[in-house]
Image: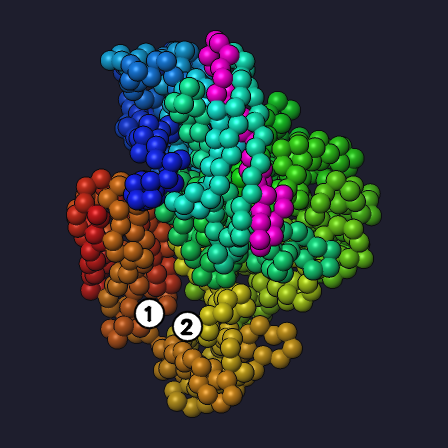
Amino acid sequence: MTKKHLSKGLALCMLIGMLVLESCSKKEDAFANRKVSFNSDWSFHLNDSIIDKDTIGTSTKWSTLNVPHDWSIEGKFDEKSPAGYGGGSLNGGLGWYKKTFKVAAEDSTKVTSITFDGVYKNSEVWVNGHFLGKRPNGYIGFQYDMSKYLNYGDKNNEIIVKVDNSKQPNSRWYSGSGIFRNVWIETTDKLHVTQYGTYVTTPKVTTEKASVNIETTIQNQYAASKKATVITTIFKEDTKVTSVTQNITIAANGNQIIKQQTEVETPILWSVEKPEQYTAVTEISIDDKIVDQYKTNFGIRDFKFDLNKGFILNGKQVKIKGVCLHHDLGPLGAAINTRAIARQLEIMKEMGVNGIRTSHNPPAPELLDLCDKMGFIVMDEAFDMWKQNKTKYDYANDWDKWHKTDLIDQLLRDRNHPSIFVWSIGNEIPEQWNEKGVEIAKELAAITRQYDKTRPLTAAMNPPVNMNIDAVTLQFEKNNVSINPLAGSGVLDLIGYNYAHQTYEHHQKNFPNTPFIATETTSGLQTRGYYDAVSDTIKKWPVRWDLKFTEGNPDNTVSAYDQVQTPWGSTHEATWKVIKKHDFLSGMYIWTGFDYIGEPTPYEWPSVSSYFGVVDLAGFPKDVYYMYQSEWTDKTVLHLFPHWNWKAGQNVDVWAYYNNADEVELFLNGKSVGKRSKKGDDLHVMWRIPFQPGTLKAISRKNGKTVLEKEIKTAGNPASLKLTADRSTIQADGNDLSFVTVDILDKDGTLAPKANNEINFSLKGKGKIVGVCSGDPVSHESFKGSKHTALNGKCLVVIQSGETSGRLELTAKANGLKPSTIVITAE
Ligand code: GAL
């Protein structure tokens, strides 16, 4: 609950004077500090020469910063980086963080813990010289009880965190380095709900009634047994819905799981369109005094994966139209920022996406909170490898010691999220091909089912069945199997397909007893705003680069018609055409929603970021975004491309994505060049016409009436810059962001589609420029500078507020172009 939320609750308590809510004000005040941010004012030092916490001397140079922090994104792209181009050619290293803090004297009788939501990677933590623990996995949260090592009152405490990301490569994509997620201090009574201590399920859901089961783990850290009352109250917004009370006696230094049951009448169900949530508030009282309060958001929904009808949510068939996302936030790197995640999800929603796969690791908790609130069907994934490495220093080296703990913590952390519908125990795990893998899968499945039986589990297999494609057949032959052993093992609740869309229609025959999910599809490749293989350069079209990519471009561009595909993948259209055809195909997760840093397939250096996104690294949609929008939303769409700046007389293929119309007519300089209608399962229409400068205009019509019109004009030379902010008012909280798009225009205001001017930014006011990005996978300019070269007419600059309100005035300048200024208000 937000503060705003709580004060509304307070007002309501006073107004209706309900008994349970009467103590709200006391409750809220008393527990406002249960979990507080511990992000600000850390000291940081990046130096491989310090290897031991005791050698950190006063002479060591420290910089001051706030976390979440990713030091790799601040470095230079490096062709020789041990991370490789897969890791984004950005370096890891060994980083040290420390922070001095005081703890109030009255907290000496309480439990004080520190929680890290994620530190990449191999973190070790000390407080006042005492070792608290080590955590190799960079993507999972962990908590340490610091109570017995703390100084209370006026005396300082010091926490030191060592982060070791020096052994490279350890990832197939850009991981980032450092304390890249939030840090919290949690202070509780010695009798308290444990970390991730509640589990709320709704085993029976009808429109009239939902049963709610609440399991609460309570820990008694007193040296005496305690008698207490546990009340769980369920709220819808600020209104109390129901509550359930239980008296307990809990042994000294003991743990107890309390099981409570209640019902919600006429529940308001969580759905993709209306992601309605409830809150369970757990209160523990000793002698009528509330000693702990803990909140759990949950949703009431009923779902299943059906063999014939696919995914059914609250009785309705819902096709999963999902995307896979890695965790980096483009120019912000891997340091999480809630607004940056929200913006990514908003851009996805606008495209019609209703599902997110957290490839290939547990995401930041904030992503899941946002998915709960915004309505996404999440596949929460645990691992990209098990025992067998994919890169030399990856998590496989920690597997034996840590996989069980990491998986359990993920399940405990995430199992109340209404947005999560599927657990994935792994992505393209090398052991999928043998019996050893099946054994590991059995173990992981048993753990998963022990902690949550309400969701199916899958694994992303490449692919589950053999098919007549060289690379795939080879895989099966190499492993001497005719069916993927993991897929055939019966361990999985859903058969998870990575690619292999050619086999989807045979799924029911191949796996008659297990429903379908396409865990990963497509892997199309595009550079935003770049087009080739137009018809007079037919030699390149369709581009096939599975044969060593000999037809790649010397400047590492990839054409943004939906025509370039990986050998294991498909065009965007090809996979969606199959998925949309059959109900039993529950849905798909496209690789990927956004471009990400690293894995610049099909190229290597100098490319440093991916080409897979439907949206580029800066957040600008590629054309195929509108194909999905025309298919996945009710929004009326007419999208025309490419740009209209070509050589005179050259033949150009013009594509249009449209919906809610039965034809599109194209005009060149006022003259019709023909009407087109989609036939059969077509997802676009096309005209091949000789270029002539001027205006290209498309009109979509239904029953002869105009639905939409779109124009593209030949642009003249770049003449001016235009700034547009996604939000012109942001919060003055030191975190909030405004994403400002720079368009390079000609003298008449038409986007200059090939402009690549270098743009300089300056900001007046209490805020800072925290990211610049053009979406160009080949750019080696820093994302953290104040200048950047545009790609195909566009660039992005990200502004972060300070902690004081006021005007932030951003100016963009480029040689020879009219500058532009925009004001953002922080309040
Ligand atoms: C898949 C893999 C992804 C990514 C993708 C690129 O096989 O699961 O992580 O590497 O290929 O096409």
Residue at 32 percent of width and 57 percent of height? 726
Furthest-top residue in this view: 223
Residue 457, above or below 572: above
Q: Main secondary structure of the magenta part?
A: strand
The magenta stretch is 199-228
> Which quarter of the figure has residue 684?
bottom right
CA neighbours of label 1 inside 10 A, class few (<14), some (14 to 19), many (20+): many
Q: Secondary structure at mark 2?
A: loop
Q: Is residue 225 magenta?
A: yes
Q: Does the magenta segment cover residue 578?
A: no
Up/down of 4 relative to 119, above or below: below
Compared with 631, 447 (above or below) is above
Residue 560 visible at all = no
Of the pair 490 and 646, the residue shown nearer to us: 490
Q: Position of residue 250 (x, y in %)?
A: 53, 17
Q: Are marks 2 and 1 in contact (CB under 8 Å)?
A: yes
* Quarter-of-image position of residue 470: bottom right
Report the coloring of the rendering.
Answer: rainbow
What residue does disc 2 label?
Answer: 643
Q: Which residue is mark 1?
A: 751
Q: Give the amino acid type for the residue marked by disc 2 in the picture.
A: His
760 left or right, relative to 279: left
Q: Residue at x 35, y 77 (%)?
A: 714
Crowding at dot 2, Cα within 10 Å, few <14 / some 14-19 / many 20+, comes out as some
Image quadrant where residue 643 sits:
bottom left
Q: Quadrant of the N terminus?
A: top left
Q: Is residue 787 left or right of residue 413?
A: left
Q: Position of residue 437 (x, y in %)?
A: 73, 35
